[in-house]
Image (spheres, rainbow, N blue to C red):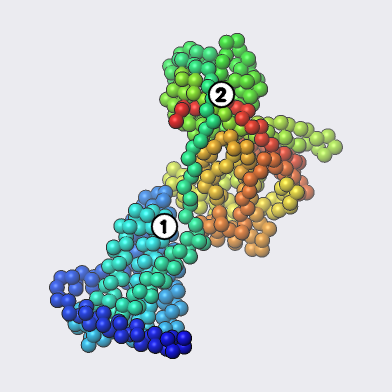
Amino acid sequence: MRSLLRKAPRRFSRLDRRLVRALSRVPGGSHDDFFRRLSAAANKGKLWFGIAAVMALFPGRTRRAALHGVLAQAVASAVTNLGFKALLPRARPLPEHLPAFRFVHPQPTSSSMPSGHSASAVAFALGAGLVRPGIGAALAPLAAGVAYSRVHTGAHWPSDVFFGSAIGAGAAMVTRKWWPVRPPFPEVRRTAVKAPELPEGDGLGIVVNTLGGSYAAETAAALGKVFPKAYIKEVDPEGNLTEVIARVATRPGIKALGVWGGDGTVGTAAAAAVEHSLPLLVLPGGTLNHFARDAGTPTLAAAVQAAANGEAARADVGMVSVERGLPEDPERLHLTMLNTASIGLYPNLVRRRELLQPALGKPLAGVVAMFRTFASGTPTTLTVNGVRHKVWILYIGRGRYYPRDHAPLVRPVLDDGLFDLRLITADESFARLRLLWAVLTGTVATSRITHLSESSSIRVEPGNSTMVLAVDGEAMPGVRGVEFSVLPGALTYYSPAA
């Protein structure tokens, strides 16, 4: 075994020289200039940084692929230049091995083993390809060309290039483990049921909250055009939303309850729909209306179609029991939760992200909002299902949300019988630095500060003071304890058939 290890370098050296001699017999031509220029373009990673800059102009997975490629390239370059080149000194090829006109000038003076250009090229192409396979396939020939150019121009031996390429591939795979590629979202699945058909809104009572963020004077009139036979009631700023919804729900001839407003308004309407056994038609309106998106009615046309055809589905409802007020005389409230609840800094994070999103795009807006929120915020002490934590964010989703990180976006299934519980904790030492580093590197989902779980019931209590609870976007201070439970399949909502 030792004899084989001693002979291995000599065998690689002989093979290198044999390959280079074969290459030296290839006639010269314009391809020599091409490979010299390609090799020079990749010096210090300039070629890959330029490609990454172009990719970063396109939001979403393309931008994430660029970041992943640059991160993999940085790891590969550091390992190659700071590690292996010092451990494996080796002389570079000489003019006697290749035609002198092919040599790159100036010839590098560092160790020939391994090839840093090859490591960076493979790391970037594979790292980007792990996120966007199509882009990775397009970059593969370019990366192979850069790697080959190092042999063609006499900068490296073939084994240097193979070893460097292996380092680059390893760096891409390691960074994928550290910064995982988001898995695809599950397909939307709904439990279809039949609801009353409402042609032209016949039998539909619609409540319009005039405090909705996108409300305009012509909103009710516009709804009247698409639902000419519906009863439409606007709630002015001084009106009691809960009472108005209850009156509309119990109005004679009403077969279904419609609602136009934000998440809080929709939650109030859902509670009335469950109480009075009415199907709910959620119309896209208000500052935020996540349930309309998840229900498949993000546009008015989709809502009209579902109502006219009687197409509907079932959804679970979260029941929230809140204790607030003085300890000796507590007040108990019972709320309906359709979407999310949160404690801690999450409401501030969402508010900042929504403000920044039009200018920066959602991914970058989320990072900036996280930095601003956690740089100035302080953690809250909470007991969650009997376990005490210092918490930056406690987030509860009614149903599994995706992606499984700090920025949940979509909910493919509305009747899974679960709460999606996410904690970002400050229990660890250097909590703020850990959090900001995780935000900067995009590793919040895989960091030790993040705890993901699912449960059908949750109990949360504050430490030595009260807490602020937000349910479906509506904040409630002075809370001394809260319990969450699921009411399975309690809500029927209109949703276009797939």
Residue 259 locus on image (x, y percent): 55, 24
The residue nearer to you, when weighing 53 against 205, is: 205
Residue 23: numbered disc:
none
Mark 2 residue crowding within 10 angstroms, few (<14) / some (14–19) / many (20+): many
Residue kind at label 2, given as amino acid type: Leu
Residue at horizontal 48%, vertical 52%? 182
Residue at horizontal 52%, vertical 47%? 403
| Mark 1 lies on residue | 130
**On screen, 201 above or below 166?**
above
Q: Quadrant of residue 106?
A: bottom left
Whether residue 285 is visible here, answered yes or no, is no
Residue 246 locus on image (x, y percent): 64, 19
**On screen, 297 above or below 356?**
above
Q: Which secondary structure, mark 2? A: strand
| Mark 2 lies on residue | 280
Residue 149 locus on image (x, y percent): 26, 72
Residue 146 locus on image (x, y percent): 29, 69
Q: Is residue 139 left or right of residue 331?
A: left
Most extreme residue toward the front, as rendered?
Answer: 1
Q: Are marks 1 and 2 in contact (CB under 8 Å)?
A: no
Residue kind at label 1, given as amino acid type: Leu
The quadrant of the rendering that contains the C terminus is top left
Most extreme residue toward the right, as rendered?
Answer: 328
